[in-house]
Amino acid sequence: QRHSNNDARRPPKTFMPTNGASRTSRKELLDLIGNNPGGHLDESSRFKFETKLRAYANTPNVDPSDVLFAIGSSVYGTNISFPVQEQTNGSKPSDEEEKETNIIIDFDYMKAFMKDVFLSYGVKPVHAETCSEVLIEADRRGIDSHGFGRLKPIYCDRMDQGILWPDKPIDVIKQTDTTALVDGNLGLGLYIGPHCMQMAIDKAKKHGVGFVVVQNSTHYGIAGYYATMATDAGCIGLSGTNARPSIAPTFGVEPMLGTNPLCFGIPSDDDFPFVIDCATSVNQRGKIERYAREGKDTPRGAVIDSDGIERTDTEGILKDMVMGKCALTPLGGAGDAMAGYKGENISLIRIELFIAISLGRGLNCVRTKCISVHHFKSDDEMRSKKRNPHGT
Protein backbone atom coordinates (compact mmCIF):
# COMPACT_ATOMS: atom_id res chain seq x y z
CA GLN A 1 0.00 0.00 0.00
CA ARG A 2 1.21 3.46 -0.80
CA HIS A 3 1.16 5.86 2.11
CA SER A 4 -0.93 9.00 2.03
CA ASN A 5 0.50 12.44 2.80
CA ASN A 6 -0.69 11.99 6.39
CA ASP A 7 1.83 9.20 6.83
CA ALA A 8 4.63 11.76 6.79
CA ARG A 9 3.39 13.00 10.18
CA ARG A 10 3.29 9.55 11.77
CA PRO A 11 6.14 8.29 13.97
CA PRO A 12 8.80 6.34 12.05
CA LYS A 13 8.35 2.59 11.97
CA THR A 14 10.84 -0.03 13.02
CA PHE A 15 11.12 -2.70 10.34
CA MET A 16 10.62 -5.93 12.26
CA PRO A 17 8.58 -8.31 10.11
CA THR A 18 6.34 -10.54 12.19
CA ASN A 19 6.16 -13.24 9.57
CA GLY A 20 8.94 -15.86 9.64
CA ALA A 21 9.32 -15.85 5.86
CA SER A 22 9.55 -12.05 5.86
CA ARG A 23 12.26 -12.05 8.50
CA THR A 24 14.25 -14.66 6.60
CA SER A 25 13.95 -12.82 3.27
CA ARG A 26 14.90 -9.53 4.85
CA LYS A 27 17.97 -11.01 6.52
CA GLU A 28 19.07 -12.56 3.23
CA LEU A 29 18.80 -9.17 1.53
CA LEU A 30 20.75 -7.42 4.27
CA ASP A 31 23.45 -10.11 4.13
CA LEU A 32 23.63 -9.76 0.35
CA ILE A 33 24.21 -6.02 0.69
CA GLY A 34 26.64 -6.28 3.61
CA ASN A 35 28.75 -9.08 2.18
CA ASN A 36 29.04 -7.50 -1.28
CA PRO A 37 29.05 -3.67 -1.06
CA GLY A 38 29.84 -3.32 -4.75
CA GLY A 39 27.23 -5.85 -5.84
CA HIS A 40 25.11 -3.21 -7.58
CA LEU A 41 27.89 -2.94 -10.17
CA ASP A 42 27.69 -6.64 -11.05
CA GLU A 43 24.87 -7.90 -13.27
CA SER A 44 24.55 -11.30 -11.61
CA SER A 45 24.48 -9.71 -8.14
CA ARG A 46 21.82 -7.22 -9.27
CA PHE A 47 19.71 -10.09 -10.60
CA LYS A 48 20.10 -12.03 -7.35
CA PHE A 49 19.12 -8.96 -5.32
CA GLU A 50 16.10 -8.28 -7.54
CA THR A 51 14.91 -11.90 -7.20
CA LYS A 52 15.18 -11.82 -3.40
CA LEU A 53 13.61 -8.36 -3.14
CA ARG A 54 10.59 -9.41 -5.20
CA ALA A 55 10.22 -12.52 -3.07
CA TYR A 56 10.35 -10.35 0.05
CA ALA A 57 7.76 -7.97 -1.42
CA ASN A 58 5.36 -10.89 -1.88
CA THR A 59 5.56 -12.09 1.73
CA PRO A 60 2.53 -11.36 3.95
CA ASN A 61 2.32 -8.04 5.82
CA VAL A 62 5.50 -6.63 4.31
CA ASP A 63 5.89 -2.88 4.87
CA PRO A 64 6.22 -0.95 1.57
CA SER A 65 8.14 1.80 3.38
CA ASP A 66 10.94 -0.60 4.35
CA VAL A 67 14.24 1.05 3.44
CA LEU A 68 15.21 -2.05 1.46
CA PHE A 69 12.75 -1.05 -1.27
CA ALA A 70 14.35 2.41 -1.45
CA ILE A 71 17.78 0.77 -1.70
CA GLY A 72 16.45 -1.52 -4.42
CA SER A 73 15.14 1.42 -6.43
CA SER A 74 18.02 3.87 -5.96
CA VAL A 75 21.02 1.52 -5.90
CA TYR A 76 20.04 -1.72 -7.67
CA GLY A 77 17.53 -0.32 -10.16
CA THR A 78 14.73 -2.59 -8.95
CA ASN A 79 11.37 -0.85 -8.60
CA ILE A 80 8.66 -2.67 -6.68
CA SER A 81 5.03 -1.63 -7.18
CA PHE A 82 2.52 -2.16 -4.41
CA PRO A 83 -1.27 -2.09 -4.89
CA VAL A 84 -2.92 1.25 -4.21
CA GLN A 85 -5.46 1.42 -1.39
CA GLU A 86 -9.08 1.25 -2.44
CA GLN A 87 -10.70 4.65 -2.66
CA THR A 88 -13.33 5.62 -0.11
CA ASN A 89 -16.11 5.03 -2.61
CA GLY A 90 -14.93 1.44 -3.05
CA SER A 91 -13.66 1.89 -6.60
CA LYS A 92 -10.22 0.73 -7.70
CA PRO A 93 -7.84 2.36 -10.16
CA SER A 94 -8.09 1.02 -13.69
CA ASP A 95 -5.55 -1.43 -15.05
CA GLU A 96 -4.06 1.37 -17.12
CA GLU A 97 -3.57 3.52 -14.02
CA GLU A 98 -1.80 0.69 -12.20
CA LYS A 99 0.29 -0.44 -15.15
CA GLU A 100 3.95 0.61 -15.20
CA THR A 101 5.93 0.44 -18.40
CA ASN A 102 9.69 0.45 -17.97
CA ILE A 103 11.77 0.58 -21.13
CA ILE A 104 15.33 -0.59 -20.54
CA ILE A 105 17.98 0.76 -22.91
CA ASP A 106 21.53 -0.54 -22.77
CA PHE A 107 24.16 1.94 -21.56
CA ASP A 108 26.40 1.22 -24.55
CA TYR A 109 23.55 2.01 -26.94
CA MET A 110 22.84 5.30 -25.14
CA LYS A 111 26.52 6.24 -25.18
CA ALA A 112 26.82 5.46 -28.91
CA PHE A 113 23.74 7.58 -29.61
CA MET A 114 25.16 10.54 -27.68
CA LYS A 115 28.50 10.20 -29.43
CA ASP A 116 26.76 10.31 -32.82
CA VAL A 117 24.89 13.44 -31.75
CA PHE A 118 28.10 15.18 -30.72
CA LEU A 119 29.75 14.15 -33.99
CA SER A 120 26.82 15.61 -35.94
CA TYR A 121 27.51 18.98 -34.28
CA GLY A 122 31.14 18.90 -35.41
CA VAL A 123 32.76 17.69 -32.20
CA LYS A 124 36.05 15.89 -32.91
CA PRO A 125 35.76 12.08 -32.63
CA VAL A 126 38.14 11.87 -29.68
CA HIS A 127 36.22 14.62 -27.87
CA ALA A 128 32.84 13.11 -28.78
CA GLU A 129 33.95 9.84 -27.18
CA THR A 130 35.00 11.68 -24.01
CA CYS A 131 31.81 13.77 -23.85
CA SER A 132 29.52 10.76 -24.22
CA GLU A 133 31.55 8.81 -21.62
CA VAL A 134 31.22 11.59 -19.02
CA LEU A 135 27.45 11.76 -19.56
CA ILE A 136 26.80 8.01 -19.54
CA GLU A 137 28.88 7.63 -16.37
CA ALA A 138 26.28 9.76 -14.60
CA ASP A 139 23.54 7.34 -15.70
CA ARG A 140 25.65 4.34 -14.69
CA ARG A 141 25.90 5.80 -11.20
CA GLY A 142 22.17 6.50 -11.05
CA ILE A 143 22.60 10.29 -11.29
CA ASP A 144 19.78 10.71 -13.79
CA SER A 145 19.82 14.49 -13.37
CA HIS A 146 23.20 14.81 -15.14
CA GLY A 147 23.28 12.05 -17.76
CA PHE A 148 21.44 11.29 -20.98
CA GLY A 149 18.57 13.58 -20.02
CA ARG A 150 20.84 16.63 -20.29
CA LEU A 151 22.10 15.93 -23.82
CA LYS A 152 19.53 18.14 -25.53
CA PRO A 153 18.71 20.95 -23.05
CA ILE A 154 22.24 21.61 -21.82
CA TYR A 155 24.50 20.74 -24.73
CA CYS A 156 22.57 20.58 -28.01
CA ASP A 157 20.35 23.58 -27.30
CA ARG A 158 23.29 25.67 -26.10
CA MET A 159 25.35 24.80 -29.17
CA ASP A 160 22.34 25.78 -31.27
CA GLN A 161 22.17 29.10 -29.41
CA GLY A 162 25.88 29.82 -29.69
CA ILE A 163 26.39 29.75 -25.91
CA LEU A 164 29.01 27.04 -26.23
CA TRP A 165 30.96 25.65 -29.16
CA PRO A 166 31.59 22.09 -30.35
CA ASP A 167 35.25 22.43 -31.29
CA LYS A 168 37.37 25.01 -29.49
CA PRO A 169 41.05 24.71 -28.51
CA ILE A 170 42.21 24.42 -24.90
CA ASP A 171 44.85 27.07 -24.21
CA VAL A 172 47.27 27.04 -21.29
CA ILE A 173 47.59 30.68 -20.21
CA LYS A 174 50.28 30.07 -17.60
CA GLN A 175 51.56 27.22 -15.47
CA THR A 176 54.11 26.12 -12.92
CA ASP A 177 55.28 22.65 -11.92
CA THR A 178 52.22 22.23 -9.70
CA THR A 179 49.61 24.68 -11.06
CA ALA A 180 48.05 25.82 -14.31
CA LEU A 181 45.53 28.37 -15.57
CA VAL A 182 43.69 27.19 -18.67
CA ASP A 183 41.23 28.86 -21.06
CA GLY A 184 38.50 26.64 -22.49
CA ASN A 185 37.38 29.23 -25.07
CA LEU A 186 33.72 28.31 -24.44
CA GLY A 187 34.16 24.79 -25.76
CA LEU A 188 32.33 21.78 -24.34
CA GLY A 189 33.13 21.42 -20.65
CA LEU A 190 32.70 17.67 -21.11
CA TYR A 191 36.06 17.41 -22.87
CA ILE A 192 37.73 20.42 -21.22
CA GLY A 193 37.16 18.93 -17.75
CA PRO A 194 38.89 15.57 -18.36
CA HIS A 195 41.80 17.32 -20.09
CA CYS A 196 42.40 19.61 -17.10
CA MET A 197 41.97 16.89 -14.49
CA GLN A 198 44.56 14.80 -16.34
CA MET A 199 46.91 17.80 -16.22
CA ALA A 200 46.42 17.97 -12.43
CA ILE A 201 47.04 14.23 -12.06
CA ASP A 202 50.22 14.38 -14.17
CA LYS A 203 51.56 17.24 -12.08
CA ALA A 204 50.70 15.41 -8.86
CA LYS A 205 52.45 12.25 -10.02
CA LYS A 206 55.61 14.24 -10.72
CA HIS A 207 55.58 16.85 -7.96
CA GLY A 208 53.19 15.57 -5.29
CA VAL A 209 50.31 17.96 -5.97
CA GLY A 210 48.57 19.38 -9.03
CA PHE A 211 46.08 22.26 -9.15
CA VAL A 212 44.46 23.41 -12.40
CA VAL A 213 41.90 26.18 -12.89
CA VAL A 214 40.05 26.63 -16.18
CA GLN A 215 38.16 29.76 -17.22
CA ASN A 216 35.65 30.20 -20.05
CA SER A 217 34.48 26.63 -19.83
CA THR A 218 30.90 25.35 -19.87
CA HIS A 219 28.80 22.71 -18.11
CA TYR A 220 31.12 19.77 -17.41
CA GLY A 221 28.71 17.07 -16.20
CA ILE A 222 29.07 15.37 -12.83
CA ALA A 223 31.95 16.63 -10.70
CA GLY A 224 32.40 13.09 -9.38
CA TYR A 225 33.72 11.95 -12.76
CA TYR A 226 36.86 14.02 -12.22
CA ALA A 227 37.41 13.01 -8.61
CA THR A 228 37.22 9.38 -9.76
CA MET A 229 39.81 10.06 -12.46
CA ALA A 230 42.15 10.98 -9.60
CA THR A 231 41.31 7.98 -7.41
CA ASP A 232 41.80 5.64 -10.39
CA ALA A 233 45.31 7.07 -10.65
CA GLY A 234 45.97 6.48 -6.94
CA CYS A 235 45.46 10.12 -5.98
CA ILE A 236 43.12 12.12 -3.78
CA GLY A 237 40.94 14.21 -6.08
CA LEU A 238 39.03 17.44 -5.64
CA SER A 239 36.86 19.05 -8.30
CA GLY A 240 34.45 21.96 -8.31
CA THR A 241 32.80 24.51 -10.53
CA ASN A 242 30.65 27.57 -10.25
CA ALA A 243 27.31 27.70 -12.01
CA ARG A 244 24.65 30.14 -13.14
CA PRO A 245 22.84 31.97 -10.31
CA SER A 246 19.97 29.78 -9.14
CA ILE A 247 20.13 29.66 -5.30
CA ALA A 248 18.48 32.32 -3.16
CA PRO A 249 20.54 33.39 -0.12
CA THR A 250 19.11 32.92 3.37
CA PHE A 251 15.91 34.97 3.77
CA GLY A 252 16.19 36.01 0.12
CA VAL A 253 14.13 35.06 -2.94
CA GLU A 254 16.35 36.19 -5.80
CA PRO A 255 18.65 33.60 -7.45
CA MET A 256 22.20 34.77 -6.74
CA LEU A 257 24.45 31.75 -6.11
CA GLY A 258 25.16 28.68 -8.22
CA THR A 259 24.49 25.08 -7.21
CA ASN A 260 28.27 24.87 -6.92
CA PRO A 261 29.10 21.21 -6.21
CA LEU A 262 31.19 19.91 -3.35
CA CYS A 263 33.25 16.96 -4.59
CA PHE A 264 36.11 14.88 -3.17
CA GLY A 265 37.48 11.46 -4.07
CA ILE A 266 39.74 9.32 -1.88
CA PRO A 267 41.16 5.86 -2.71
CA SER A 268 40.09 3.09 -0.34
CA ASP A 269 40.92 -0.50 0.63
CA ASP A 270 37.76 -1.70 -1.12
CA ASP A 271 37.28 -2.28 -4.83
CA PHE A 272 35.86 1.22 -5.12
CA PRO A 273 36.92 4.65 -3.80
CA PHE A 274 35.11 7.01 -1.46
CA VAL A 275 33.59 9.81 -3.53
CA ILE A 276 31.20 12.56 -2.48
CA ASP A 277 29.64 14.72 -5.18
CA CYS A 278 26.72 16.91 -4.19
CA ALA A 279 25.24 20.28 -5.05
CA THR A 280 25.14 22.99 -2.40
CA SER A 281 21.38 23.31 -2.84
CA VAL A 282 18.55 21.05 -1.62
CA ASN A 283 17.89 20.10 -5.23
CA GLN A 284 19.42 21.18 -8.51
CA ARG A 285 17.68 22.03 -11.77
CA GLY A 286 18.51 18.66 -13.33
CA LYS A 287 16.61 16.87 -10.57
CA ILE A 288 13.57 19.11 -11.13
CA GLU A 289 13.77 18.35 -14.86
CA ARG A 290 13.70 14.66 -13.91
CA TYR A 291 10.58 15.25 -11.78
CA ALA A 292 8.98 16.83 -14.85
CA ARG A 293 9.83 13.83 -17.04
CA GLU A 294 8.32 11.53 -14.41
CA GLY A 295 5.25 13.70 -13.83
CA LYS A 296 6.09 14.24 -10.15
CA ASP A 297 5.75 17.24 -7.85
CA THR A 298 8.91 18.88 -6.55
CA PRO A 299 9.36 18.23 -2.81
CA ARG A 300 8.33 21.17 -0.66
CA GLY A 301 11.26 23.22 0.59
CA ALA A 302 13.46 22.82 -2.48
CA VAL A 303 12.22 25.89 -4.38
CA ILE A 304 11.07 29.35 -3.31
CA ASP A 305 9.45 31.95 -5.57
CA SER A 306 9.71 35.72 -5.68
CA ASP A 307 6.76 36.01 -3.30
CA GLY A 308 8.50 33.83 -0.71
CA ILE A 309 6.23 30.82 -1.36
CA GLU A 310 7.70 27.30 -1.33
CA ARG A 311 6.63 25.81 -4.65
CA THR A 312 5.93 22.19 -5.61
CA ASP A 313 4.42 22.59 -9.13
CA THR A 314 7.30 21.22 -11.18
CA GLU A 315 6.29 22.48 -14.63
CA GLY A 316 5.55 25.95 -13.30
CA ILE A 317 8.85 25.99 -11.42
CA LEU A 318 10.85 25.24 -14.57
CA LYS A 319 9.09 28.03 -16.48
CA ASP A 320 9.55 30.56 -13.68
CA MET A 321 13.20 29.64 -13.15
CA VAL A 322 13.92 30.75 -16.71
CA MET A 323 12.33 34.12 -15.94
CA GLY A 324 14.09 34.46 -12.58
CA LYS A 325 10.83 34.20 -10.64
CA CYS A 326 11.91 31.07 -8.74
CA ALA A 327 15.07 30.11 -6.91
CA LEU A 328 16.47 26.95 -5.43
CA THR A 329 17.06 26.84 -1.68
CA PRO A 330 20.51 26.18 -0.20
CA LEU A 331 21.36 23.05 1.78
CA GLY A 332 19.26 23.35 4.91
CA GLY A 333 16.40 25.03 3.06
CA ALA A 334 14.98 28.54 3.12
CA GLY A 335 15.48 30.64 6.24
CA ASP A 336 17.51 29.66 9.27
CA ALA A 337 15.27 27.10 10.99
CA MET A 338 17.22 24.21 9.40
CA ALA A 339 20.48 26.19 9.05
CA GLY A 340 20.10 27.15 5.41
CA TYR A 341 22.85 29.73 5.93
CA LYS A 342 25.34 26.85 6.12
CA GLY A 343 24.53 25.70 2.60
CA GLU A 344 24.57 29.30 1.38
CA ASN A 345 28.05 29.93 2.74
CA ILE A 346 29.44 26.61 1.53
CA SER A 347 28.33 27.62 -1.97
CA LEU A 348 29.69 31.13 -1.57
CA ILE A 349 33.03 30.42 0.09
CA ARG A 350 33.82 26.92 -1.19
CA ILE A 351 33.37 27.84 -4.86
CA GLU A 352 32.54 31.45 -5.68
CA LEU A 353 35.18 33.11 -3.48
CA PHE A 354 37.69 30.30 -3.95
CA ILE A 355 37.52 30.58 -7.73
CA ALA A 356 37.60 34.38 -7.63
CA ILE A 357 40.84 34.17 -5.63
CA SER A 358 42.29 31.47 -7.92
CA LEU A 359 41.69 33.64 -11.00
CA GLY A 360 42.67 36.89 -9.32
CA ARG A 361 39.25 38.33 -10.06
CA GLY A 362 36.41 39.89 -8.13
CA LEU A 363 33.36 38.00 -6.92
CA ASN A 364 31.03 37.24 -9.81
CA CYS A 365 27.71 35.99 -8.44
CA VAL A 366 25.66 37.30 -11.35
CA ARG A 367 26.37 35.97 -14.85
CA THR A 368 24.38 36.47 -18.00
CA LYS A 369 25.66 33.43 -19.87
CA CYS A 370 26.21 29.84 -18.88
CA ILE A 371 29.98 30.17 -18.56
CA SER A 372 31.71 28.07 -15.94
CA VAL A 373 35.01 28.14 -14.13
CA HIS A 374 36.26 24.76 -12.88
CA HIS A 375 39.09 23.82 -10.60
CA PHE A 376 40.82 20.47 -10.27
CA LYS A 377 43.23 19.34 -7.58
CA SER A 378 45.12 16.07 -7.23
CA ASP A 379 47.42 14.89 -4.43
CA ASP A 380 49.63 11.91 -5.15
CA GLU A 381 49.28 9.61 -2.15
CA MET A 382 51.69 7.19 -3.80
CA ARG A 383 54.55 9.44 -2.73
CA SER A 384 53.98 8.88 0.99
CA LYS A 385 52.79 5.26 1.14
CA LYS A 386 53.13 2.12 -0.88
CA ARG A 387 49.80 1.54 -2.58
CA ASN A 388 48.41 -0.67 -5.28
CA PRO A 389 47.30 0.85 -8.64
CA HIS A 390 43.93 1.71 -7.05
CA GLY A 391 45.63 3.68 -4.28
CA THR A 392 44.85 1.17 -1.51
Image (tube, rainbow, N blue to C red):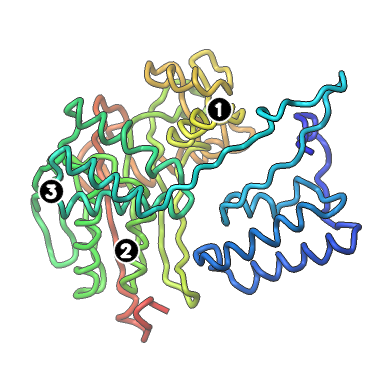
- Residue 384: percent from the left, percent from the top? 34, 82
Name the residue tied to disc 2: 229
Camera-side mark, 2 or 3: 3
**Residue at the location (50% across, 36% down)?**
283
Name the residue tied to disc 3: 124
Look at label 2 and name its amino acid. Answer: Met
Cβ atoms under marks 3 and 1 closer than 8 Å: no
**Residue at the location (57% across, 55% down)?**
75
The numbered disc on residue 295 is 1
Q: Residues within 10 Å of mark 1 (few under 14, many from 20)?
A: few
- Secondary structure beneath dot 2 equals helix
- Secondary structure beneath dot 1 equals loop
Q: Residues within 10 Å of mark 3 (few under 14, many from 20)?
A: some
What is the CA distance from the residue labelled 2 to the residue labelled 3? Answer: 22 Å
Cβ atoms under marks 1 and 2 closer than 8 Å: no
The numbered disc on residue 196 is none
Q: In the figure, is residue 135 to the left or right of 192?
A: right
- Residue 121: percent from the left, percent from the top? 16, 37
Q: N-terminal of the two: label 1 or label 2?
A: 2
Q: N-terminal of the two: label 2 or label 3?
A: 3
Q: In the figure, is residue 103 to the left or right of 135?
A: right
* Residue 260 position by quadrant: top left
Look at label 3 and name its amino acid. Answer: Lys
Camera-side mark, 1 or 2: 1
Q: In the figure, is residue 251 to the left or right of 229?
A: right
